[in-house]
Amino acid sequence: MAGSAEAAASTSSRRTLARGPRRGLLAFLGRREVLPTVLIAPVLIFFIIWNTIPTLWLLGLSFYRFSLTSGRPPIYSGFYNFTSILNDSSTWFDLSRTFIFVVLAVGIETIAGVLLGLLFWGSERLPGRRVALTLLFAPMVVTPVAAGTFWRLIYDPTFGVLNWFIRSLGLPAVRFLSDANVAFGAVLAVDVWMWTPFMVLMMLAALASVPKAELEAAEIDRLTWFQRFRLVILYHGKFILMLGILLRTIDAFKTMDLIFDMTFGGPGTATQLIAISLFRSAFESFNMGSSSALAVVLLLISIAFTATFLYVLYLRERRTADA
Amino acid sequence: METDPAAEVGAALAGRKQNRVGRRRLIQSSAALGAAVLACPRYAFSQSEKASPLAGKSIHMQILGVAGWLPSKLGVDMSPEFAKYAKDKYGYDVSFSFADAPFGTLFQKAATSLATRSQEYNIIISDSQWLGALATPKWIVQINDIIAKNPELNIKWWSPSIHSSYQVFPDGTNKLWGFPQVGDVYGIFIRKDILEGPGEADAFKAKYGRPLPTTWEAFEAMDYEDWTDFITFFNRPEKGYYGLAAQYSREYDAASCPTMSVMRSLGGDVWDPKTGQVQGILDTPSNAHAMELYKAWLKFQPPGATNYFIAEVIDAFTQGKVFAAWQWVATGATMIPASLKDKVIVVPPPSFKRADGSRVRNYIIGGQPWVINAFNDPEHMQVAIDFMKWWYLPETSHEYLMRGGMPCDYATCSRPDFDGINPWNRTYKYMLLRSSDFWHDPKYSEMLSDQQDAFTGYYTGQIKDPLHALQWVACQQQKILYDEGTAVKAPTGACAGIRL
C-alpha cells in the first residue's frame, strides 16, 4: 500500500511538474493587472519607438544650432532658437494667419456640419439619401494633395472651369490663387469643402447617441425646435461633437499639404500658415535646430487647444460636482 | 623554356598523319590540347579583369533627376545605350532606374537620402545652386582626382560660365564637384505664324514708325523698351491671346531668376560672394527699378500670371493663350510640340539700357550638373565614372543634341550644323556667353525662400514699394549669412524695425 501511495504521489508530482510552468504562465497572465499590460504592450512599444523617442529627440535638438547642409556638428545654444522664433515678426504673422484660418475653417465646417447632419437625420425616408451621403463624404476621402491639384486647376483664371462659368456670365475672371486679397478665402473654401463632411459624420454620430424617449418626451412637452436641439440633442451629443471640433481644430492647425499644392503659401505670404513655415524651415532651409524649436512651440499650442476644449467640455460637470 | 601548345598540337597531328605516333606522344599532345582549350578563355577573362574589375558583374544604378524635365529624362532614356557600351567595353552588365521630384522638392529628396549616408541615388542631377549645399557636408564626390585620372573628362566647355556654374564650389576656387548635364538659358519663344500674319508688319510700322522685327538678328538688337512696344502690339485679349507669359510664382526660384536677370543687366547685383555682403548691394534703387520693369510686363499677361512657373508658361504658350513666352530654352521640345512645328522662333530676351547708355544682357543661367553620391560603394562609383566618360563621348553628345538636349562641350556646340538642329540652339549658344549663376552657398535655399516671399509679395501687390521688399530681403539674407559665418558684417541696426 505504501509503495502504491508513493507511486501515486510520484505520478502526481510529475504531472504537477509537467503542468506547472504552463499553469504558472496562465495564472500570471490571468492576474487582473497583468493581462491588460501584456495586451497593450505591443502598441506601447510601437508608440515609444515611433512617437516618444522622436519627440524627445526633437525636444533635445531644439536646444542646438544645427543645419543639415552646413557640414558642422550641432552646437548647444540654450534657448537661442526659441527666442529667435519668438522675436521674428514673420512667426507671429504666420501664427495669426493660422489662428484666423482655424477659427474660420472649423467654425464654418461645424455650422454647416450641424445643419447638414440635422437635414440628413430628419430625412431618413428621403429617396436617394444614401447616394447623397456618399457624394457628400467623397471630398473627405480624397488625398489633400490631389484635392489641392484639382482645385488649383478649377481656380485657374485662364484654363479653369470656375472662371469659364464666371466669364460666361459676362464677369471678369477672378484670380483666385494669385490675388493676395482672394487667395486666403479660396484656400479656406477648399478646406471647408473637404472637411465639412467630417463634421456631418460627427453630427450624425452625436444624433445617434440621443435617446429616442427623451426626444419624444420633448415633443410631448411641446419644446420648440431650438429648445429640443439645445436641451436634448446637444446635451447628449456634445461630447462627440466637441471631439469632432477638437480633431478638426488640431488638423486645421497643421494644414500644410493642401496649401503646399495650391499656393505654396503665396501669393507673397497671403496663405502662409505656420505649418508651411515649419516645412520650409525644415525641408527647404534644413535648419533642423530652429525647425525643432518651432515644432515644439506648435506642439505646445496643440496641447493647449486640447486642454482648453476638455476644460470647456467638463466645465458644467465640474460646476455641478462642486455645487 | 615555354612550350607553344598550338605548335605541339600541330606537331602531334603531323606525326599522326605520318602514322609514327607513339601512345605516350599522343597522351602528351592530348593533354597539351586540353590545356590550351582551357587556357584560352581563362586568358581572355584575365585580360578582361585587367580592363575592368567589374567585368562579369551585374550592377544596378539609380539616377535622381528632375520630374517632367526633358533633359533629365534624356539622361535616363539614353542609359540603355550606356548599358550596351559598358558591356562591350568593360564587360559588365548595368541597369538603371530613375527617381524624380519636381524642382521645388528635388533637393529635399536628395538631401534627406544623402544625410543618412545612403547610396540610394548613385548619380544625382542637381540644380547648379545646390553645389554648395551638397558639397559642404561632403555628400557628393569632389571630382578633381577623377578628372586627373581620366583625362577624357577634362573637357573644353562652350563658355566659362558652364565651368563656374556647374562645376565649381566655392566660387573662384579650383574645387570641382559637378559634370554639366544640361546647359540652360532664358530665351523668348515667339509665335512666328502670328508675327508674320498679313498686315502685321504694316500696322506695326504705322504705329511705331519702325519695321516689325521678324529675324533673330532684329530681336537680338532689341532692348527692354523695344520689347515693351512689341508685346503691347501683340497683346490681344479680345482675340483670346495675351502678349507674354513669364514666371512670377512663389514656387522655387520662379520669380527670382528673371528678376535677378533684369537687376544684373541693369548693372546691379545680389551679393558679394567674397565677403558675403548683401545689404547695400541687393537693396539699391537700381535693383528696385529692375523689379518695377519686370512687374510692368504683368499687364500683358493672362490673369493669374503671378502664379506662373515653368509648367504654367508651357501650358499658356502651347494652348495659344499667349503670343510670346519668356522661358528656359531647355523646355524647347515641350514648348514646340508637333502642332507648333515651324511656327515658333526662339530669340534672346531683351537687353537693358544702363546709365552709361550701354545695352547689356547679363542673365541668370539655368541648367543642371550631374553629381556623384559620395557614399557609393567602389563598384557603383566606378560605374558612375564610366557613365560620365560615356556621356561626354562625341557620339553620345550628338545623340543627346539630336533628341533635344543641350550639351555644354565646345566640340558639340561648335558643330557647323548646331544652330539648325533645334530652333532654340542659336539662342542657347548666344545666351550661354551672357549668363552666369548666382549663389552656390550652402544657405542658398533659405536665402531663396525669403527672397521669393519678398519678390512675389511685390508682384502680387502685397508690398507696394520694391525697395522696401529688397531691404527686408537684404536684412534676412545678411542675417542668414552672418549666422553661418559667411558674411563678415552683421545686419545693420535698421533691420530691427523692418517688416515685410
Image (cartoon, rainbow, N blue to C red):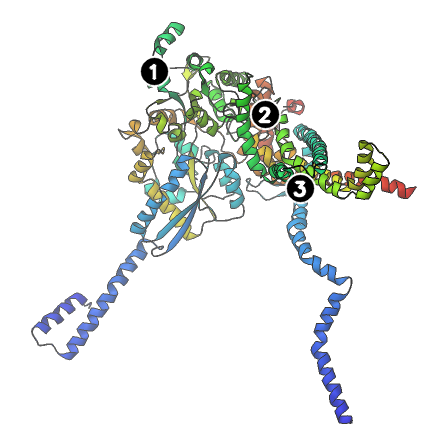
Nearer to the camera, A193 or B340: A193
CB within 8 Å, label 2 to label 1: no
Q: Which of marks 3 and 1 is in front?
A: 1
In percent of width and height, residue A229 lies at: 79, 35
Left or right: A107 in relation to B288: right
* Circle 3 residue: A62
Q: Nearer the viewer, mark 2 or mark 1?
A: 1
Left or right: B22 in relation to B114: left
Helix or strand or loop: what does disc 1 sit on?
A: loop
Helix or strand or loop: what does disc 3 sit on?
A: loop
For the residues beneath circles 2 and 1, the answer to whether they share a chain is: no
> Which chain contains the residue that carries disc 1?
B
Left or right: B72 in relation to A157: left
* Circle 1 residue: B196
> Which chain contains the residue that carries disc 2?
A
Sequence-first tag of 2 and 3 = 3
Q: Distance between the residues labelled 2 and 3?
A: 28 Å
Where, by quadrant of the figure, is residue B72 drawn? top left
Q: Which amino acid does label 2 sit on?
A: Gly
* Circle 2 residue: A268
Q: In which quarter of the image is the C terminus of chain B?
A: top right
In percent of width and height, residue B394 lies at: 29, 38
Q: Quadrant of the N terminus of chain B?
A: bottom left
For the residues beneath circles 2 and 3, the answer to whether they share a chain is: yes
Residues packed near mark 3 inside 10 Å, few (<14), some (14 to 19) or many (20 plus):
many
